Amino acid sequence: MSAPQINISDVASLARLTLTPEETAKFSSQIGQILSHMDSLKQIETGNVPEVTPPAQPNLRKDEPTPSLSLQAVLSNAPAQANDLIVVPKIVE
Amino acid sequence: MSSPSKWEAVIGLEVHVQVRTRTKMFCGCVNQYGDAQNTHLCPVCLGLPGSLPVPNEEAIRKTILSGLMLGCQIAPVARFDRKNYFYPDMPKNYQISQYDDPLCAGGGVTLDPFLFPKEIQETDEAKAGRKIRLVRIHLEEDVAKSFHFEDRSAIDFNRAGTPLMEIVSEADLRTPGEAFSFLGSLRQILLAGNVSDADMEKGQMRCDVNVSVRPFGQKEYGTKVELKNLNSISGVRRALTYEIARQIAACEKGEAIAHETRRWDDEAGATFTMRTKEKAHDYRYFPEPDLLPVRTDQGLTDSARALVPELPSELQTRLTRDFGVTPYQASVLTADRILCGYYEKAAAGTPNKALVANWILNDFLSTQPDPSTTPVRPEFFGELADLVAGGAINSAQAKKVFTELMANPSSPKEIVKKLGLEQISDSSALAAYCDEAIAANPRSVEDYQAGKMNAINALKGFVMKKSQGKANPVQVDEILKQKLGS
Amino acid sequence: MSLTHESIATLRRRLASKEIHSRDIVRDLLQQIEAREKTIHAYTHLDREAALAAAEKSDSSLALGGIPIAIKDNLNVLGDPCTCASKILEGYKAPYDATAIARLRQAGAVFLGRTNMDEFAMGSSTENSALGITRNPWDSTRIPGGSSGGSAAAVGGRIALAALGSDTGGSIRQPAALCGCVGLKPTYGRISRYGLVAFASSLDQIGPLTRTVEDSAILLSALAGHDPRDNTTDLRKPESFLSKPDGSVKGLRVGIPKEYFIPGMDAETEAAVRQSADWFKKNGATLVDVSLPHTPSAIAVYYILATAEASANLARFDGVRYGRRATDPRDVLDLYHRTRSEGFGPEVKRRIILGTFVLSAGYTDAYYRKAQKVRGLIRQDFEKAFASCDLLLTPTSPEPAFKLGERTQDPLKMYLADAFTISVNLAGNPALSLPCGFTQANLPIGLQLIGPRFGEEKILQAAHAYEQSHDWHQRLPPA
Ligand SMILES: [Mg+2]
Ligand SMILES: [Zn+2]
C-alpha cells in the first residue's frame, strides 16, 4: 500500500511552522519515504493484542501546597514583560 | 414573528466548573485567584521544559463526587489525554484533558421548577420536572488569563492549571428557561457537594451553549450555532432568547443558518458573529504519556461516595414531608444550606415546624440575617411558635415579641414576661372583666339579647381594652356568652 | 599518571582517604579538555571557575563527594543554560534542578560542564546540533553517535570521568558503543525524568555514561528511585546494583536473538559480538537461541510514537515565556510561526511535522493507534524471550562510527543506526552497552546486554564479569 499524499505545508501550519519552498520540497520527499516505510505496519496482525492493564496509580498527589517560583524567576526568562505580566503581540482569532 | 408553536429550539450546554482544591491540578501551587500576578507558578504550571504533571487526588475525588451526585457511571480506569492547540494562555500549547476515558459518563440533571425564572415558575414548562441527560464529565486544567490592549496582549498565568471539570449535556434542552434551570439546578448540586462555588460571575462556572432550531416534529437537527461570552445564568437565558428568535426569523425568511460561533453582547442584548467554522479544529488528541491511568476502583470512588451529601431534591422531599413546609419554602431552604441548618435546629424541638418555617422565612429573613453568626438562637423560634400555637400570645403580640427578639435576643418566654404580654387566661380574672363590661354597657347587652349577635363585639372590645389586650379572646367570648345566657 | 584515566570507584577511595582532593581531578580534566576539546567539541558550556569552586567546597565523605560529572545539555541545572543544542532555547536559564541533578548534588557530585547533543535529542550522530558538531575521539573524521554524542565523546575521549545522557531510542547506548565507553539505559520508570527536557515521554530515560561497569552501577544507585514529581517512576526501592562484584556468569542463560544478526551488518562488529557470546559460554553460561519476531517493525513504530509525542512536547517552545522570540512579530500567530521556524533545525522540524501528521484527523488509526498496538507486540516479544533466558546479548549498533556528513541527507538511513536499540525503549526494558573489541581501524565496538524490566542488577553483574576479563575499557584513544 502506498503512503498517503500529504500536504506538508498544511501539516506544518498545524504545528505553527512555516517552511521555505526548499524545505517543503525536501521534507515532502523525505517524509514520503519514511511514511512508505511505516506503511509496512499495516501488514501486521494486531486484532488480538491484549490491552495492557494499567498498574494501580500509586502516585497521585495529596492536595498540599508546595512553594512556587518567585515572580523574578518567572519573569527573568520572559522575552517581554511589563507590570508583572508576560507580554505577547496582539492575539487575533 | 412566527407563531411560537411552529419552531422548536434544541440546546446543549458545555459547562466548565473550577474545582475547589487547595492546589492546582498537576502541581502544588496554590489554587487561588485574585492574588498578585504571576506569583502562583512553578515549572509545571508555567510549562517550563522538563517539567512533569502529577494529578491532584482531591480534584479527581471531587470530580467523581460530582459524577456520583449526578448519577453518572464512574470509569474504573480513567485516562488523561493531550489536546493540542496553540494559544498564549496555555503554557504547554496542549491542554491535559480527557478524551476516550473520562472519569464520569451518563447521568443527568432534573430541572427544579423553583430554579426556573421567577415569572415562569408556575407554568407547565417549569412544573414538568424534566431530566436533562449528561454525556460526560471530564477533568482538565484551566488556562491562564489574558488581557488585551490596543497593540498587544499580556498574560497572568496564575489561573493556568486550576482543576476544571467539563460537564457536557445532551442536546435535551428546549427553552431558555430550561437552560436557566439546568444551570441553577446543577450549581445547587455542586454547592451541596462542596465541589465548587460555581459562580458564573466570578468565572468559576463558564458555559458554552450550542443552539439550533427546527420545525416541531422534525427529527433532524438544524445547523447549530455556538454562543460564547456568557457571564451569568440570566445572561445565558437572554442570549438564548435572542438567538432562538434570530434563527427562527432567518428560517422563516428561508435564509440558511451559518455554522458559526457568536458572541453575546450583554449591553447590546444581541449576539454577533465571532468566527465562522469553515475549518474544524484538529486537536490531535492522544494519551498523555506522562501520566499513568487512574484506577478509581481501588478506593478512590469509595472515598468519594462517603462524601455524597443529601442532595437538593432529597432535602426538598424531606422538608415538605417531615416539616410540613410548602414546596416553595423547601426550595428557599434548599438554596441556602446555612439557613436550612438554622431552620432545622429551630424546628427540632417543636411540633409546630411549619409555623417556625413561616417565622424564619418571612420575618427573620426580611431582616437579612447571617444565620451562621446571628445571636438569635434558632431554638427561640421554636419557642415563639409554641407560644403562639398554645394560645399564650396572639399574633399581634407575637410580632412584638419578634421585634424585641431581634433587638435584644433572649428567650421569647422571658420577652413575653418582660413586656408583660402574657395573656390572661385565668377564668376568675376574665369573669371579673366580663362583669364589668356587662355593667358598663347595658345597651349592648339589650341589643344582644334582642338577637343582634354582633353587639357582643362591643363587650369584647371593652374587655380587651381594660385588660390592655392581654385577655384570651377565645375565653372571653365563651364567658360573655355564658353570662348573657345564650 | 593523570587522574583522568581513573574510574569513579578508584577516585572515591582515594578522595575518601584524603590522598587526593577533588580539585586535583577537576584540574587534570580541565587540562585534558584544553588539549582535546578543540578537536572533539564535546561541551556546549563549560564554566571552569565554577567547577573548580565546587570542587574546592566538595565533601569527600559523601557517596559521590567531589566526583566531577558532565551533564547532557537537556537536563535542567538550577541557574545554568539548558540549550538542548537548539537556537530556540537561547537565553533560557533553568530556574530549577532536574531530580537526577538534585540527587547527584545531594551525593556531593561536582558538575563539570554541559555536553553537546543532537538538537532536542533527535539524531544518532550529534550532527543535528545548533552549537556545532562533536567528533569521535577515536577518529575525528567520524561521528560520535548520538544523541548523547557529547557525553560519550567526553567520557570516551577521557575529558570526563562520567556523564549523564538520555536515551529515547538508543541515545546513550549507541554513542557509548561508538566512543568506547559504558552506557546504561535503565528500565523505564527507574530514574525520574523530572527536569529532563522531553523528547518522547513514554520512551525517554536518563542514564550514565562511564568508563567502567562498576561506575555505571555507582551512578545508577545515586540516580534511581521513586520521585513524587514523576508519575511514571516506579515505587520500588533501588537495590544494590552490583552486590556481587566478583560474581561469575556460571549458569546464566544468555539469549541470542536471531533478528539482531542481520545480513549486511558490519562483519567486524558481528565477529566481536559472537566472540563475546563465546566468552559467556566458555565461562559457564548457556547460550539460548531466541526470537523477537517484531524487531523489523520497531523503527516504524518508534518513529510514529516518538514523533507524535515530540510534536506535543515541543509545542511549548513558542517564544512566549522563555527562550528565543522572533523580532517584531505582527501578531501572535506570526510570533509562533517565525519563532519556531527560525528556532528549530531541520531534523526537529521534520520530526514535528511527521508527528503532527500521524496524529492528525483521519490518520490517527492508521499510524498512531496501529503503532501503539505493534508496540504491545514488541513488548510481548521481550516477555516471551525472558521466559527462557536471563539476559539478551546483541550488538549495540550494526556498525562502528560512520563518517561525518555521510547520512545527513538520508534520514531513513540515519534512523536505521538505531535498529538494535530502539525495541528496548519501546518495551521499557533496561540495557547496557560496553566495549567488546575494536575494528582494524581502531574503532570501538559495543556489546549490548538487555535485561528484563527492573533487571539492571543482572545486566551489571554479567557486564562486570565480562569487563574484568577483558581490557577493552582500558584502551586509550589516540592523542
Ligand atoms: Mg474543555
Ligand atoms: Zn505550579
Image (tube, rainbow, N blue to C red):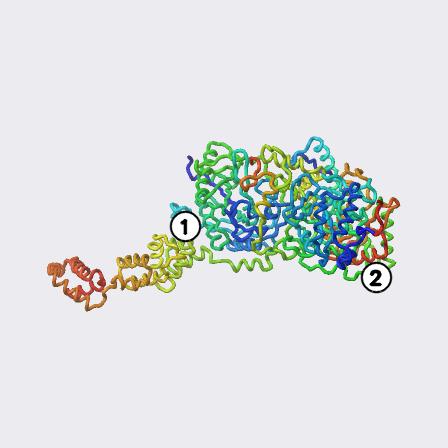
Q: Secondary structure at mark 1?
A: helix
| Above or below, B187 relative to C343 | below
Which residue is at 76% across, 59% downward? C17
* Residue B425: numbered disc: none
Which residue is at 61% across, 39% downward? A79
Q: Is mark 1 within 8 Å of ligand 1?
A: no
| Above or below, C184 relative to C128 | below
The quadrant the C terminus of chain B occupies is bottom left
| Above or below, B244 relative to B412 | above
Which residue is at 73% across, 40% downward? C129
Mark pair 2, 1: CA separation: 81 Å
The residue nearer to you, when weighing B378 against B329, is B378
The residue nearer to you, when weighing C113 against B279, is C113
Please provide percent x and percent y for residue B308: 50, 58
Query: What's the residue type where badge 2 is placed?
Result: Lys
* Residue B114: numbered disc: 1
Query: What's the residue type where badge 1 is placed?
Result: Phe
In this picture, residue C34 sits left or right of residue C103: right
Residue marked by disc 2: C250
In this picture, residue C430 sits left or right of residue C278: left
Res C459 visible: no
